[in-house]
Amino acid sequence: MNTNTRTALAGLSRWLVMLAVMFFGSAWSLRFWQAWVYIAIMAAASVAIIAYLAHYDQALLERRLNTGPVAEKEKSQQRIQAVTSMVGIVLLLLPGFDHRWHWSQVPATLIILGNVCLALGFVLVFLVFRVNTYSSGIVEVAKDQRVVSTGPYAFVRHPMYSGAILMFLATPLALGSWWTLIPAIALSAMIVVRLLDEEKFLAINLPGYVAYTSQVRSRLIPGAW
């Protein structure tokens, strides 16, 4: 196991521990089965993706290790990521409080649907990684980077963001919390702000991107937007 793989798995472990602390700490109970299922899906999907990248695309795995507001090079993206991170904390704390004080009553069928959508979001992210070795965790253009127009990029310009929004909106259902729809929608809106700013950057810095946008009109949802 090389350094990048160990670093990725260590980062995932810390992330899962943080998730558990936030979910069960705010719920003040370990009897929060929705959170256990959510964490299990996150862990299984993330380990599978890391294993794939470790075997097939070490360069992309290394790129994905560099993420977050501090890592961003563009000032606008630093601000967007900072706000996104704060809203993300609310997204992860609110379900536990909801569970603790029984604010929401979400049917089991919708909880299952939420988990299915969560898994589908990971599938979409995986499909992005398969075709785009340049899908960095920050907004940047790598040396010799080219426009990718195959796979999910043939349908939408930002398929990874589509997957992220699907996971955000699936989270309230998967964790049984209607109130968590508020930060989930806010996070989705922040993704839109991020991608619009990113498109301006790519139009200037990535050769062929403007032509690609004329070919693929949809940003997130095929045929809609």
Image: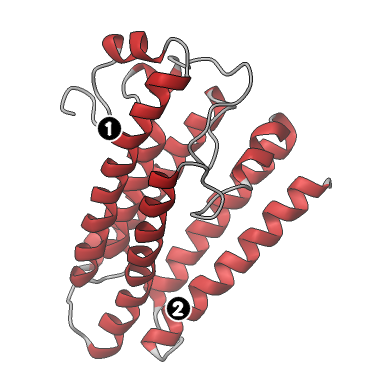
Residue at 40% in and 28% down: 201
Q: Residue at x 41, y 20 (%)?
A: 204
- Mark 2 Cα shell of 10 Å, populated few (<14), some (14-19), many (≥20): many
- Quarter-of-image position of residue 184: bottom left
75 or 41, which is in the foreground? 75
Disc 1, SS: loop
Quadrant occupied by the C terminus: top left
Secondary structure beneath disc 2? helix
Q: Is residue 34 above or below residue 198?
A: below
Within 10 Å of disc 1 (Cα), the crowding (few <14, some 14-19, many 20+) is: many
Instruction: Estimate the x, y position of residue 91 in percent, counting from the top left.
Output: 33, 67
According to the picture, the residue beneath numbered tag 1 turns out to be 220
Amino acid identity at mark 2: Met
Q: Tell me the kind of residue under disc 1.
A: Leu
Q: Earlier in the sequence, mark 1 or mark 2?
A: 2
Q: Is residue 80 above or below residue 151?
A: below
Label 2, on which residue?
22
Q: Could you tell me which residue is drawn at 32 percent across and 60 percent down? A: 171
Against 115, is 34 above or below? below
Q: Quadrant of residue 106?
A: bottom left
Q: Nearer the viewer, residue 160 or 32?
A: 160
